[in-house]
Every structure is written in C-alpha cells, then in structure tokens.
Amino acid sequence: MARVLTVLNINRCIACYSCMLACARVVHKSFSLRKSAVQIRSRGGLQSRLQADICRGCRDAPCAAVCPTGALLPRKGGGVTYISGKCNGCRQCAEGCVARVITFDEEESRPIVCIQCGACARFCPHEVLAMVEEAGNGA
C-alpha cells in the first residue's frame, strides 16, 4: 500500500521551516519557501498556534480529475503524480483541490503540487510530518 503525508503532532512544530525548505529544494529545485508544496502557517490570535497546510493524498484526486491535459494523474494509494510536460498552466488543479493547498508558480507557469515523496517529513527535525500507510485516506 502506498504511503501518504500526514501531520503527526502539530504541537511539536516550532516553525523552523525545514520541511518547506526540503520540499522547495529537493522537489522544485529552489530555495524559495514559496515554491514548497507544504506550508507552515500561524493560525493567528494570542496563542499563535501553527498549522501545516499539506496535501491530503485524496484517493479520488479531484485535482487530477479536473486537469484537462492529464498533467496530474491519480497515484495508487492517494495523491497525484505530476507530469510537467503535459501541464498547460490552466490552474484548474488549484481550483479543484479540496484542501486548497495547490498554489501556482508564476515564474514557471506551473502548479506547486505535493507528489507525496516524503522529503518534507525526512527533514522535519521534530517529527511533525510523516509518511504513513493509510487504509481510508482521501476527501
């Protein structure tokens, strides 16, 4: 069974951004946090708790279902595979994402989409993120 990204314990997160840097660097070949498919954000308020905006690894992959060119293909076990050569930059995947975590790289005219590779989890020093086998994931 394929593994999908999950948040194990957000309370351990210190917002070091190691996960975001790993994704941007390893997957998107960039040092910009904006090019990360994982986003760590403050929920605001007096306590400033953090949240991790990550791909849910949907089994039915609504983002892939709305892609008119087949640039996003459903991945066995959840999530998607991204084929950059097929992407026309239409942004329909971002609109179709139920978790609202697909962003768009304006410079390269392509989506920044999680491919469930686990680079973010490997570089998280506090084990906030992990790749887990899940029987019933998806939206």
Image (tube, helix red, strand yellow):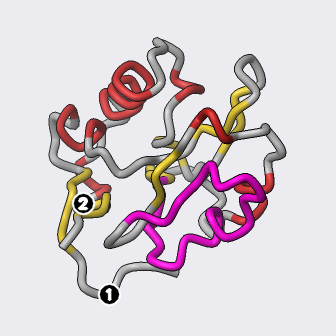
Q: In this view, does 87 lie to the left or right of 9?
A: right
Label 1 crowd bin: few (<14), some (14–19), many (20+), radius 10 Å: few
Q: Nearer the viewer, mark 2 or mark 1?
A: 1
Instruction: Look at the image and give the residue range highlighted in magenta.
Output: 54-75
Q: Nearer the viewer, residue 83 or 21?
A: 83
Label 2 crowd bin: few (<14), some (14–19), many (20+), radius 10 Å: few
Instruction: From this view, report whether residue 61 is shown above or below residue 44.
Output: below
**Residue 113 screen position, x and y as percent:** 55, 45
Mark identifier at residue 9: 2
Residue at 52 percent across and 81 percent down: it is 139
Residue at 62 percent across and 33 percent down: it is 85
Instruction: From this view, report whether residue 94 is shown above or below residue 26.
Output: below
Q: Nearer the viewer, residue 85 or 54?
A: 85
What kind of residue is marked 2? Asn
**Residue 118 screen position, x and y as percent:** 26, 45
Element marked by disc 2: loop
How many dots with numbers?
2
Residue that extends furthest to the top in the rendered view of this protein: 31
Whether the magenta-drawn stretch holds residue 68 is answered as yes
Whether the magenta-drawn stretch holds residue 73 is answered as yes
Spatial CA distance of label 2 from label 1 is: 19 Å
Q: Quadrant of the image for the N terminus?
A: bottom left
Tag 1 residue:
136
